[in-house]
Image: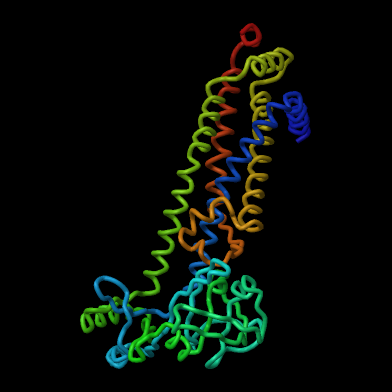
Amino acid sequence: MKKHYRILEYALSSLLRRKYKNLALFFIYTLIVCLLSSVMFLTHSLKQEAINVFIDAPELIVQRLLGGRHDLIPLSYVDTIKSFPGVATVTPRFWGYYYDSLTGGNYTVMALTSNASLNLITGRMPEEGECAVGKGVAQARQLDINDALFFTLASEQKLMLKVVGIFTANSSVLTNDLVIFDKNDVIRFFALDKAKATDLMVKINNESEIATVANKIKRTLPDTRPITRSEILRTYENVFNWRGGMALVLFCGALLAFFIFAWDKATGLSAEERQEIGILKAIGWETSDVLTLKFWESTVISFTSFLTGVILGYIHVFEFGGTIFVPILKGWSILFPPFDPMPYIDLYQIVVIFFLTVVPYLASTIIPSWKAAIADPDTIMRT
């Protein structure tokens, strides 16, 4: 241990002698790790947000299609679906989107249902002529209990509602853009047909029968599209994986530059470094000692850059909202009120970043050092 301590002490002094070169290396290395970790942290956080949105979602959602597009579904379909074995309940849902020109946010307006998994921060759930808003909407519009909230779609579609509740939920995405109305207010505001709903929520007694019930609904009501909760989660996961990959492609030039740099390190040492190794060999250092020295030098640079880059990536995503990558990963959802990603970190991501950045650099440093260390000291110092 004392020997390794002395070698580490010498390695630190050697790095300080070439401080400007190593500082430039540290900056580039840290930047690469920061960009890579930012993309992976934000992608994983958004996927976890999507999971939290749908963790309490119904096992099955039934929509009606008209011309290949989502259309209102007749309420008469409720009794038909209820008659299927295995179906516990069928609940109509009434909802739509509303663009708020004051904040530039796209809100989801939904009628209150009995199984809504919302946690009230203050107030209560609305009755007719009232509304409850998510925490993000309340912050964007600076709303408090008993404030008035005005909505307008057209000259005949206007509502002024009293805010009676502010809520949160498992996902900050859900609380940011959701506004809860009474069912009659939703129907009146969106001018919906009273005999139709936006879609139907179906609760199944046995989760193993979800696919069977969905097939029965599709056969009996061919103009419908049953969507299972697992399909929604899988779609969101694939979308964010694809967008995360696209973000990495945009910065592949920086990654490529780093790999070229690592390859350049592997092709040989500088004349100064080779001369240093020759001197150390001449004064009695063993090949293993030289390799230990170079290992400690590479470890200090790579681990310091890795930890700094990961910490900066964490701060960029979870303290500043990942401003560089959010437009790429969220897509059209940038119309939503801004939200702070919840800090979800997967150990697998850290390991991937480590093997993409630290391992190549260590290998590219040790290999040329080993080639120089096994050579004759006199030959090394003459080259």
Residue in the picture at 29% in, 79% down? 64
- Image quadrant holding the C terminus, namely top right
What colouring does the structure picture have? rainbow
Residue in the picture at 54% in, 91% down? 129
Image quadrant in which you'd find residue 374? top right
Q: Looking at the image, can residue 363 be seen? A: yes
Residue in the picture at 62% in, 50% down? 313
What x and y, as percent, mark residue 73? 31, 83
Q: Looking at the image, can residue 206 be seen? A: no
Please state the total of marks drawn on the protein image: 0
Above or below, 349 against 111 in this view is above
What x and y, as percent, mark residue 227? 34, 74
Image quadrant in which you'd find residue 265? top right
Query: Residue reaching furthest front?
Result: 155
Front one among 30 and 156:
156
Front one among 214 and 252:
252
Q: Is residue 11 left or right of residue 149?
A: right
What x and y, as percent, mark residue 49? 53, 66
What x and y, as percent, mark residue 12? 75, 30
Above or below, 46 against 60 in this view is above
Above or below, 51 against 302 in this view is below
Q: Is residue 180 left or right of residue 278?
A: left
Residue in the picture at 58% in, 64% down? 338
